[in-house]
Amino acid sequence: MKEDFNETKKEKEEVSEGNKKILKNLADRIERAFEEGEDSVRLSVREDVTINIETKDVISLELPEYTLYKSFRSARFEELEKTDGEVDLYFIR
């Protein structure tokens, strides 16, 4: 799994180490759930974070300062459902 996140900055700010760690943890949870054969993964996110499916293998995480994109080698995404503070991300199997 690629450790880096591609970023598009809305303003000229560096990605904080705290945000990098949170995003890496989300990516690790997604990879682990997919590798374990789960059909979906439930992610808890901060109120100011939005997760979107960009393509079948790329998700974006929108934060107030910037948007990060994460691609996955094996996981493929079908859809996501947003609920209060959580996102259910469904895999293509």
Image (tube, grey):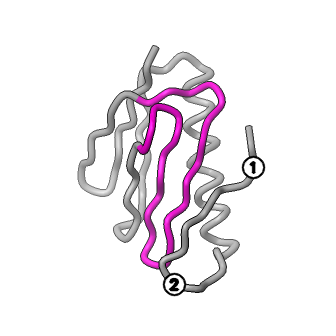
Farthest bottom residue? 12
Q: Nearer the viewer, residue 23 or 70?
A: 70
Left/right of residue 56 with respect to residue 88 in the rendered view: right
Left/right of residue 24 with respect to residue 52 in the rendered view: right
Depth check, mark 2 against mark 1: the one in front is: 2
Q: Residues within 10 Å of mark 2 (few under 14, many from 20)?
A: few
Q: How crowded is mark 1: few (under 14 residues within 10 Å), some or many (20 or more)?
A: few
Three-letter amino acid code at the position of disc 1: Glu
Residue at the (37%, 28%) spot, across then down:
78
Q: Nearer the viewer, residue 46 or 52?
A: 52
Point out residue 52 in the picture as x, y percentages from the top left corner.
38, 49
Point out residue 11 in the picture as x, y percentages from the top left corner.
51, 84
The residue tagged 1 is 3
Residue at the (47%, 53%) spot, across then down:
60
Point out residue 83 in the picture as x, y percentages from the top left corner.
24, 49
Q: Which of 40 and 9 is in front in this view?
A: 9
Q: Is mark 1 on a helix, strand or loop?
A: loop
The residue tagged 2 is 11
Q: What stretch is highlighted in magenta?
A: 54-77
Residue at the (55%, 37%) spot, across then down:
30
Residue at the (49%, 65%) spot, across then down:
67
Task: Verify whether residue 28 appears in magenta.
Answer: no
Q: Which of marks 2 and 1 is nearer the N terminus?
A: 1
Residue 35 appears in which quarter of the rendering? top right
Q: Is residue 18 above or below residue 83?
A: below
Left/right of residue 75 with respect to residue 83 in the rendered view: right
Q: Is mark 2 on a helix, strand or loop?
A: loop
Three-letter amino acid code at the position of disc 2: Glu
Left/right of residue 74 with respect to residue 82 in the rendered view: right
Point out residue 69 in the picture as x, y percentages from the top left corner.
55, 54
- Which quadrant: the N terminus? top right
Task: Verify whether residue 68 appears in magenta.
Answer: yes
